[in-house]
Image (cartoon, rainbow, N blue to C red):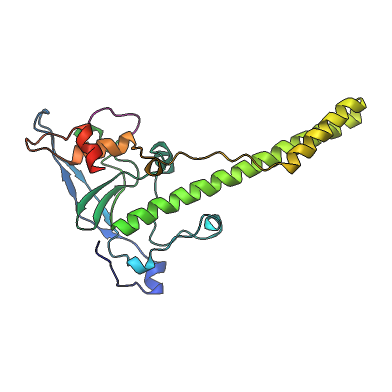
Amino acid sequence: MTMKNWELTEEEKEVYTPKEGETIVVTSSKDEQQAEPVNIKTKDFTDISSLDIIVPSQRTILDKEKPYFIPEINHQRFRNNGYTLPAQKIGEDRYLVALDGFTQGSYIHKPSLDVINKNGEFAIMSLDLYAATQKYYQSKAKEENKQKNIQDHQNRIDYFKNRLEEKTKEGADEQELSSLRRTIERAEKSKPKQTRLTVFDKSNKMSSDQLIMLMTLNKDEEGNFVSRREAWKIY
């Protein structure tokens, strides 16, 4: 891995905008009806110093501003892709990263130039920055999920407290009121139930979006899109 050691000034970081990157030209498979090549326009983030690439911890991530080097992404596609960003290595420490998804959406079962999200945002990043960007959005999603679970737990407690207040005003019998008090007491003593997010890169899974990206951008010796098996080997 090539480490980039130059650093931007604080002023440059505040107004940072990635430069226009190279255009990735994707050609059709030899066994497919010949189609016009697809040009993928990119933004180049490779001028980010490895020394700058530090992301907030999950515990503090919602309270801190997004680091200047982290690009915006399509959050819905990120969730659909198992909290991962589809990527393809295109050179020495250079990765093409699909920020809005590689395909145009929904489940795509085979590679084709027609399915490429050519109007989406694509970035060229170092491996360090790619990993940091993915980690940043994964950590943010996990913390948001954790806070939602805590709020849902509190909402449940509040619901039963309101029920107790309503039943008390209605003159409900003591048995019903005692049951509500015990429910509230148990809920207040228990910890919020935490649901886990399924993160594909942590569970040896690959999104169909990532699979189609690898199959489309890699060709076999005969010039055809690589098979699913070969795409898994690349992954």
Image quadrant where residue 63 sits: bottom right
Q: Is residue 104 visible?
A: no
Residue 110 drawn in magenta: yes
Residue 233: horizontal and vertical position, in percent?
23, 40
Could you tell me which residue is drawn at 32 percent across and 65 percent down? 48
Residue 226: horizontal and vertical position, in percent?
17, 35
Could you tell me which residue is drawn at 30 percent across and 59 percent down? 45
Tell me the chief SS of the magenta region. loop
Left or right: 73 in relation to 177: left
Q: The magenta stretch spans which residues?
A: 104-111
Could you tell me which residue is drawn at 78 percent across and 33 percent down? 183
Left or right: 97 in relation to 167: left
Residue 193: horizontal and vertical position, in percent?
62, 39
Q: Residue furthest left?
A: 222
Residue 47 drawn in magenta: no
Q: Is residue 168 visible?
A: yes
Q: Quadrant of the C terminus?
A: top left
Q: Nearer the viewer, residue 26 or 222?
A: 222
Q: Nearer the viewer, residue 67 or 160?
A: 160
Residue 127: horizontal and vertical position, in percent?
29, 56
Image quadrant where residue 67 sits: bottom left
Left or right: 142 in relation to 49: right
Q: Is residue 138 above or below residue 47?
A: above
Q: Is residue 142 above or below residue 179?
A: below
Q: Quadrant of the N terminus?
A: bottom left
Left or right: 160 in relation to 82: right
Q: Nearer the viewer, residue 47 or 42?
A: 47
Give the mark count. Answer: 0
